[in-house]
Structure formats: C-alpha cells, structure tokens
Image (cartoon, rainbow, N blue to C red):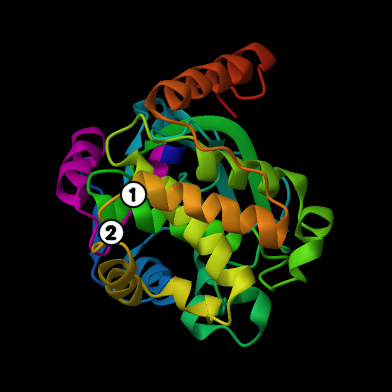
Amino acid sequence: MKTIEFDTIFLSYDEPNAEKNYADLCSKVPWAQRIHGVKGSDAAHKAAAELADTDWFITIDADNIVNPNFFDLDISFDDPKVQVYSWCGENTVNGLIYGNGGVKLWHKDFVRQMQTHEAAEHDRAQVDFCWENGYKQFKEVFSTVHINTTPLQAWRAGFREGVKMTLLDGEKVHPQEIEQKIWWHNIHRLKIWSTIGTHAVNGKYAVLGARQGAYMTNCTDWDYIQVRDFDYLTELYNEIVAPLENIDAEIQILGKKLNLELGFSWPYLDNELSLYFANLYKETINLGSSYFRGSNV
C-alpha cells in the first residue's frame, strides 16, 4: 500500500506554529484531519485512532513540516509483529536526525490497547511510548522538526529530551552509571541537545532546557514523570526560566554542575562555535550516508 492511502491525523496541543504547519500539511494532503487540545499523549493518540477510518493511520506532530515525497511511499506489511512504523525528523536547531518528532504510521488496534504516559501502569511507559513490541524505525528523513518558534517551545523540547535521554527504559539509573548504562545513541543525542543551538533563533533555550532536564532528573528529587504534562512545563518555564536575565551564563553554570555531579564534560558553544559544529555535524551525516532523504522504503 502507499502512504497516501492511510488517514493522516495532525496532532496539536498548544504549539505556536501549529496553524501554519497544519496549513502546510493540508496543501499536500487536503483531506488531513486534526486532533487539537487533547491533554495527554496517550489520550491524544487514542483520539486520533477513533478519528481514523483506515486500519492504519499516520500522525504528524504539530511542530513538523512533512516532505511531500513521504506520501508516495510504498509500505509492505511483511512482518505482522510490527504495529508502528517511524521515520526520522531533522531538528532545525541542532541538526539531530532520529525518531523524535518524526512521522509515524500506527495500527489502530495497537493504539486503542496501549497504556502509556498518563495511562501507564508501569514506570517504563510513564514518559514515552513502549517500543519494545512491534516498532520499526526507518533511517529515511521525511520531515523537519521546528521546535524554536518561541523561547518556551524551544526550552520545552530541550527539557523533555534532557529528561528522557538519561532514562533506561523510562526509569532512572544511578547518576554515576548513566554513561555506562544508557544507550550510547541517547548519550550522543543528549550531548548535541546540550551544546549545539545557540546560533539558532531561540536555540539557546533548547540548550538550557536540555541541561536543566538532565540536572533536575538526576541531581535533585524532582519527579521526572511530570515531563509528560505540557501545562506543568509551561508553569515550570515561567518559574525557572522566564525570570533569568542571562541565559548564556545559566547554561555555563549548569554545565559546571553537571560536570561535577554527573561527570558530563559539556562545553559552552557561543553562536559562532555552535554554527560551526552544527554545519560540521550535518556534513558528517551526509558523508556517512546513514540517512536517505526522500527515497522509497
């Protein structure tokens, strides 16, 4: 089957670029439907499943711009165990390419039965979806993820990844064992989130958020499960970020704290260095040919 044959659902909550991005999606898929303002990731995806008429449906996050070539893909359902297909998104602040924010294709029955985030019954699903059963990640990049329309949006994106990238199957590990026990891909992504971005519009807020998320999760008694609540994160931003007079200085202070308590040696990159390393990182990915942009699956 082709991806164009599945219902496409746009998921939005409070993203400042949601209207613009939904209009862009509708220019490519005029029949795209939308779920807006449903609190909780589990509930929002279940609402999308109920809205979809097809057995499989596509979700597009509100901060995403989709490559129109995605809707020309051929999908072969040759493995009955797979319940979710995911494609990579490219982050416009730091250049990271992975499943975060990417386009996904879900089996309706799987979504109806899953229990994650606010509906989770065990720790590993409290802040993310459970991918151990029936998940397939493609290397192809079919969207760009725009997380920096406002300082709050950029900070929240960084903060959420700062929390999740230090968890093992959704659970905390001893602070001194993070780099030994956490999958090295996630440590790599955390390093990028925590250093690259000051050159981009509102990008320093993403860097700050990643450092704050990692620090609060692993160096304080803060309840990391609250990272799933967007309303709470807005309140937290207004409490600990909005009053700051010097974001760059706070980034450097957190770097020293994280180095002391977790052994993370993360440099502070000013605008020039951040742009340099972002471009170098992009060149490295292109040279490695690890990702295939716009090709058929």
Task: Tell me, yes or no, whether the highlighted magenta stretch contains residue 39.
Answer: no
Q: Which mark is residue 244?
A: 2
Asked which quadrant contains residue 189, the reply is top right
In the depicted structure, whether residue 93 falls above or below residue 168: above
| Picture residue at 58% right of the left edge, 82% below the top | 221
Q: Which residue is mark 1?
A: 247
| Picture residue at 25% right of the left edge, 49% below the top | 32
Is 10 on the left or on the right of 112, as rendered? left
Residues marked 1 and 2 touching at CB (< 8 Å): yes
Q: Which mark is residue 284?
A: none
- The answer to whether residue 40 of the structure is visible from this angle is yes
Q: Secondary structure at mark 1?
A: helix
Q: Secondary structure at mark 2?
A: loop
| Circle 2: residue type | Leu
Could you give the CA–CA distance between mark 1 and mark 2, rounded to whole angstroms? Answer: 6 Å
The x and y percentages for residue 243 are 24, 64
The x and y percentages for residue 187 are 69, 48
**Start-end of magenta stretch:** 4-29
